[in-house]
Image (cartoon, rainbow, N blue to C red):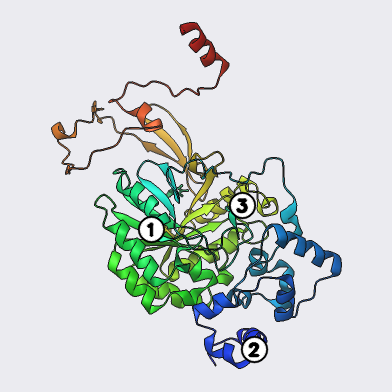
Amino acid sequence: MKTLTARQQNIATRIDTQVALNNWKDWKWQRKHVIKSVDEFEKITGIRFEKPERDKMIKTTEKFPLSITPYYLSLIDVEDYETDPIYLQAFPLPSELDIQSYDMSDPLTEDKDSPAPHITHRYPDRVLFHVSNVCSMYCRFCTRKRKVGDIDSVPDRQSLMQGIEYIKNTPQVRDVLLSGGDPFLLSDSFLDWILSEITAIPHVEVVRIGTRTPVVLPYRITEGLISVLKKYHPIWINTHFNHPRELSPSAKIALAKLADAGIPLGNQSVLLAGINDCPRIMKKLVHLLVRNRVRPYYLYQCDLSEGLSHFRTPVGKGIEIIESLIGHTSGFAVPTYVIDAPGGGGKIPIMPNYLISWSTHKVVLRNYEGVITTYKEPDSYKPYFCDRDCEKCDKHLPLDEAEEGDIVGISKLLSDADDTIALTPENTERIQRRKDNNS
Ligand SMILES: *Cc1c(COP(=O)(O)O)cnc(C)c1O
């Protein structure tokens, strides 16, 4: 089949002689033939590991299993694999077994913020809904590494219904993120059912889907899947490209199908040592993404999950990358760099500093070139007291029946409508003394 690359044909024939060539682009065939052992990997790629190294790799896969689609494997440059970004994302290194003292199995405490099965509810108006335990490839840097390979099964309707009930009973939820695992490893009909249930809930305004299939299994984006998704607009999709090499012709076709279906596409990358910790690589990646109608959304600092220490970079590397993008390229090509707070505080954005100093009526700023400039603030701005009584306000906010939730966090401190003057940690000795004295 001439639409396959030589490397793909080579791999296909090693897996299944002639049959494979015709089935390469069938996602179910790809799923059925995922590479799950060091042995198979060697057979198919022709790479041979030295014995001590090989033993360590096998030991690693016993703790953190291995799974690579033939497609993703075909992107590896077997002549120069040791530093290959595809290889490093897919194949286990013995350093995964180095557990650092600050590593955690669930650094984002997703399991604690779970009020119902399959749900993580952390932010006021949106929830994560883990609808699938399955992935076609096990990314070595997975933040949910604790769960990888655990229960390789799809939750049943009854079990998911508990999550759906929670969303139904929680009117603040206006945005539901389907996550996993990978939601696109569910069948079209099962996904259709989930989407129909969620979009039927009146207070749910948008559904988002996080998937890595356009990267590791682009053939999953079939006409059948598209016709299901199109029924449930507005649907937003976030995919997960980390390196320019992942934007293969097949990946581009998958992205085009999704974009043509009117689905806004975003991308979340993880900053990974030895893979994409380079301003030029990141610039190339974001340019390829926007050319393929994908907006870079987040760049994540690598989490503190167990077995990821060799992938982590200092935070300064992320700031350096963002510094190299802002101003230097299109605004919509720049992702927000975030650290997902250990302990479950959610995503915290990190930026280079552009505000250098200020006085009562002027701010001093610097731009990407190092130009230092001033912005004179208005003399005429009349501060107004806002008691959040929007009915009486003359700013024309169309009010609907939706109740606004409580004002929380720092915005509560800024608000006139709330007289909280401080947010105080509960677990200090001083606060304990206060409590003791008052009791
Ligand atoms: C990332 C995340 C979200 C979505 O956050 P956005 O900033 O809106 O993209 C929601 N819930 C949880 C638990 C998350 O980790």
**Residue nearer the viewer, 155 or 267:** 155
* Residue on which disc 3 sits: 146
Q: Where is residue 97 in the image (x, y as percent from the top left)?
A: 74, 53
Of residue 201 and residue 73, the one placed in the foreground of this image is: 201
Q: Give the SS element for disc 3.
A: helix
The Cα atoms of the two marked residues, 3 and 2, are separated by: 35 Å
Question: Disc 3 or 2, which lies upstream in sequence?
Answer: 2
Query: Residue 363 lies in what quarter of the image?
Result: top left
Residue that protrudes farthest toward the front in the picture: 158
Q: Does the residue labelled 2 lie within 8 Å of ligand 1?
A: no
Q: Residue at x 81, y 64 (%)?
A: 55
Q: Which of 333 and 48 is in front in this view?
A: 48
> Which quadrant would residue 184 be assigned to in this image?
bottom left
Rendering coords of residue 23 (x, y %): 53, 86
Residue named by callout 2: 13
Instruction: Please name the residue that numbered disc 1 is placed on.
Output: 208
Name the kind of residue labelled 1 in the image. Answer: Arg
Dot 1 beta carbon under 8 Å from ligand 1: yes
**x and y percent of residue 307 in the render?**
68, 52
Q: Going 48% across and 42% down the picture, which residue do you hit? A: 346
Q: How crowded is mark 2: few (under 14 residues within 10 Å), some or many (20 or more)?
A: some
Q: What residue type is labelled 2?
A: Thr
Tell how many labels: 3
Distance in Å between CA atoms under marks 3 and 1: 24 Å
**Is 55 placed above or below 429 here?**
below
Residue 23, placed above or below residue 393:
below
State yes or no: discs 3 and 2 in contact (Cβ < 8 Å): no
